[in-house]
């Protein structure tokens, strides 16, 4: 992938997305850092839960993953792809950001199989088996910024709900991204009300087994563990704490975050 600039994959969490000014400011950040290749993957957490409630469906989660029935998958796709993805892309296009909306399902970005959670098949929750990098590379080579909804399909075309963190790491690993930045509704991993600036991949299992990290954050850390094992250099969890948070991270300036890396910690060396 040497003909592409350094790849920065940003995973935008569903709840932080609604923060006033975020889309505008992130659009500016992308425009001001065009020497990097950006890819955006987004979730839809709270907006999906609200929409399901309108249909009298109570969301159920196991280990931070949303169980998804045949009825729910179409509602979830409607929210995440047709509403959220379209909202981000049309906002950025108006701003001059060359965004292209892609969905795992419509654009065959991933092949998934049904995911087992604690030995139970979780209906239409998918686990990514492979990433179709060629379609992504076509857009990246033409300087488009893919904005990706994680809804996917299996080998015979059934729609599956894929956790956005898992989609983000699968893409990051398959394209050997340089950095993976998770924008969440918390600035990182919090233990006893304290933000932990740095954790090693070797600590992840214990943090989850002890129950200190759970729900969506457990999914995030397990996904990060996988990505680092597959060669992603480092992952950062942060929130939208200032309008230029991405530039600050790229310049290795101090912002509230948790950094997870497999090797020598460049961030802590320079701060
Ligand atoms: N130790 C912990 N530190 C920080 N957050 C934690 C911890 N344990 C559990 N969490 C939960 O994890 C949540 C973040 O994951 P969540 O899946 O909700 O957000 P996201 O992945 O950013 O968004 P989306 O799922 O919509 O894409 C936090 O809001 C918090 O409730
Ligand atoms: Mg999540």
Image: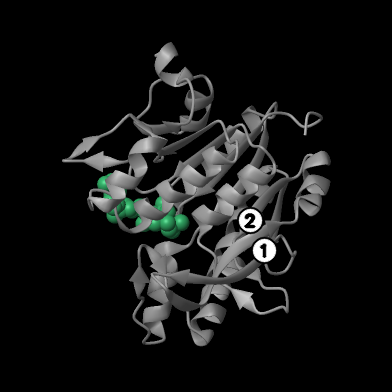
Q: Is residue 104 visible?
A: yes
Secondary structure, mark 1, is loop
State yes or no: discs 1 and 2 in contact (Cβ < 8 Å).
yes
Q: Closer to the N terminus: mark 1 or mark 2?
A: 1
247 sits left or right of 93 in the view: left
Q: Which element is circle 2 on? A: strand
Per the rendering, the mark at residue 148 is 2
Q: Within 10 angstroms of label 2, few (less than 14), some, or many (20 or more) residues?
A: many
> Does any atom of ligand 1 lie closer than 8 Å to the CB of label 1?
no
Task: Specify the farthest residue to the left.
Answer: 192
Q: Position of residue 236 (x, y in %)?
A: 45, 35
Q: Residue at x 50, y 61 (%)?
A: 163
Q: Is residue 140 left or right of residue 247?
A: right
Some atom of ligand 1 lies within 8 Å of the CB belonging to the residue at label 2: no
Q: Quadrant of residue 45?
A: bottom left
Pair 1/2: label in front: 1
Residue 14 can be seen in this image? no
Q: Nearer the viewer, residue 101 or 2?
A: 2
Q: Is residue 94 above or below residue 79?
A: above
Residue found at x 48% / y 49%: 223
* Residue that carries the numbered disc 1 in the rendered image: 104
Percent position (x, y) of residue 234? 51, 32
- In this picture, is 177 found above or below 107? above
Query: On the rendered structure, is 92 left or right of 76?
Result: right
Q: Position of residue 242 (x, y in %)?
A: 40, 33
């Amino acid at each position: 992938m040497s003909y592409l600039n350094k790849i920065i994959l940003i995973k935008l969490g569903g709840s932080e997305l609604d923060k006033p000014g975020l889309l505008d400011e992130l659009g500016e950040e992308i425009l001001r850092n065009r020497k990097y290749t950006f890819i955006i993957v987004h979730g839809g957490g709270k907006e999906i839960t609200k929409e399901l409630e309108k249909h009298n469906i109570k969301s159920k989660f196991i280990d931070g993953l949303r169980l998804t029935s045949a009825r729910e998958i179409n509602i979830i796709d409607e929210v995440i792809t047709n509403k959220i993805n379209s909202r981000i892309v049309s906002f950025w296009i108006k701003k001059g950001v060359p965004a292209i909306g892609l969905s795992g399902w419509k654009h065959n970005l991933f092949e998934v199989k049904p995911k087992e959670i604690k030995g139970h098949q979780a209906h239409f929750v998918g686990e990514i088996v492979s990433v179709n990098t060629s379609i992504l590379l076509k857009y990246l080579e033409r300087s488009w910024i893919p904005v990706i909804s994680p809804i996917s399909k299996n080998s015979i075309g059934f729609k599956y709900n894929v956790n956005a963190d898992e989609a983000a790491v699968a893409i990051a690993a398959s394209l050997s991204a340089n950095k993976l930045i998770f924008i969440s509704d918390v600035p990182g991993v919090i233990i006893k009300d304290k933000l932990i600036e740095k954790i090693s991949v070797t600590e992840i299992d214990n943090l989850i087994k002890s129950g200190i990290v759970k729900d969506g954050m457990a999914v995030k850390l397990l996904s990060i563990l996988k990505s680092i094992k597959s060669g992603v250099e480092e992952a950062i969890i942060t929130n939208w704490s200032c309008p230029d948070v991405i530039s600050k991270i790229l310049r290795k300036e101090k912002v509230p975050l948790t950094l997870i890396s497999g090797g020598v910690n460049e961030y802590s060396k320079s701060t």
